[in-house]
Image (tube, rainbow, N blue to C red):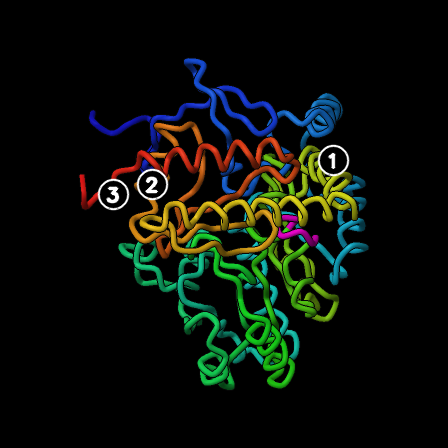
Amino acid sequence: MTITPLMPVYPRCGVRPVRGEGAYLFGENGERYLDFASGIAVNILGHGHPALVKAIADQAATLMHVSNLYGSPQGERFAQRLVDKTFADTVFFTNSGAEAVECAIKTARRYHYANGQPEKHRIISFSNAFHGRTLGTISATNQPKMRDGFEPLLPGFTVVPFNDLAAAEAAIGPDAAGFLIEPIQGEGGILPATQEFLRGLRKLADEHGMLLILDEVQCGYARTGTFFAHEQYGITPDIMAVAKGIGGGFPLGACLATEEAAKGMVFGTHGSTYGGNPLACAAGEAVLDIVGEPAFLENVKQTGARLRQALEQMIPNHDHLFESVRGMGLMLGIKLKSDSRAFVGHLRDKHGLLTVAAGDNVVRILPPLNIDDSHVAECIERLSAGARDYVLPEAA
């Protein structure tokens, strides 16, 4: 037998974490890494945050899981808190971002079905998007690396260029149900939607009886300095998918919707065995207690601004390698002039700095949201050192 016990679908590197503390990860041989990847924007309170650890431990000792056939005091309380802080009137809890996006797609299609317009089923999404790895979510992207070998994909999706409002409008037809978009593309390269584009999609959706579905799995939950990224665009969605940071590392996601958009989601239309179990909700509430506070959000903005300024000041010293900085808050990307994946590996293996590669030769900087200035300085120091001794692949 040559296949590994863990199905070999991940290009796993040599980092083998066994412990985390704050903004640091420790390997099985004592290696110490500054974690500015955060499990790809998941560990927003870092590792081992005492409030989150206590909430999980206390709830685990009390009640971990019951069927959703029963009432859920924990889920009802958490959902109400999310409703109170957002545009939404109702919440469905999931275990992951992909599940949250699947629920969002189903909610949009079911809305038009409930309105007597079942022909309005087609979702318009955007190039280089990442919405998950299920058949439904890969059908909503045009990235071959996610689609190849899984055809035939699900019908009912049209992909048009990101930040191209004319193309989005041209794709509208009598079967169009809604737009599905990340306000800031994460895996695609930390690419924010322009103000004109996202506001334009909201206007087009209203004019054509469509729904605006936001995927804030990566850019939401305080990552950009507001609770959700769309707040910085002055618009609200009809449906929104959330995950990653919502559980601070515990598997949790959510689909939020207005009462109108969710009108078709009645008994029997959707479900999840584990979604919204008491343990997940305890983790979610512990995270919300911290990141939902205005002072926390303001600190993310300020720390993000200082980190961005430091990155921009560093770039001219290594202009053979770096091109620009993009993103919002503590969702930042450094655009490279060469392969970002090779540089991410160099930072990891030679300088103990964990970052994440993205499309368009971008290095994603996604630290815990509670870092301080010492972590910012350490990141810049390790990045600069990595740039100084990095040998470009073509020069090797």
State the quadrant of the C terminus.
top left
Give me the C-alpha separation between circle 3 and circle 2: 9 Å
- The residue identified by callout 2 is 343
Report x, y in % for residue 5: 32, 26
223 magenta-colored: yes
State the quadrant of the N terminus.
top left
Q: Which mark is residue 286?
A: 1
33 magenta-colored: no
- The residue identified by callout 3 is 392
Whichever of labels 1 and 2 marks the residue nearer the N terminus, that label is 1
Amino acid type, label 3: Leu
**In this rendering, position of residue 29 left or right of residue 98:** left
Task: Tell me the chief SS of the magenta region.
Answer: loop
Taking the image as drawn, is residue 335 in sight?
A: yes
Q: For this rendering, which residue is in front, 93 or 381?
A: 381
> Which image quadrant is residue 300 in?
top right
**10 Å neighbourhood of mark 1: few (<14), some, or many (≥20)?**
many
Report x, y in % for residue 118: 55, 78
Q: Is residue 159 above or below residue 356?
A: below
Magenta segment: 221-227
Give me the C-alpha separation between circle 3 and circle 1: 44 Å
Q: Are marks 3 and 2 in contact (CB under 8 Å)?
A: no
Whichever of labels 3 and 2 marks the residue nearer the N terminus, that label is 2
Q: Nearer the viewer, mark 3 or mark 1?
A: 3
Q: Secondary structure under badge 2?
A: helix
Report x, y in % for residue 202: 62, 76
Give me the C-alpha separation between circle 1 and circle 2: 36 Å
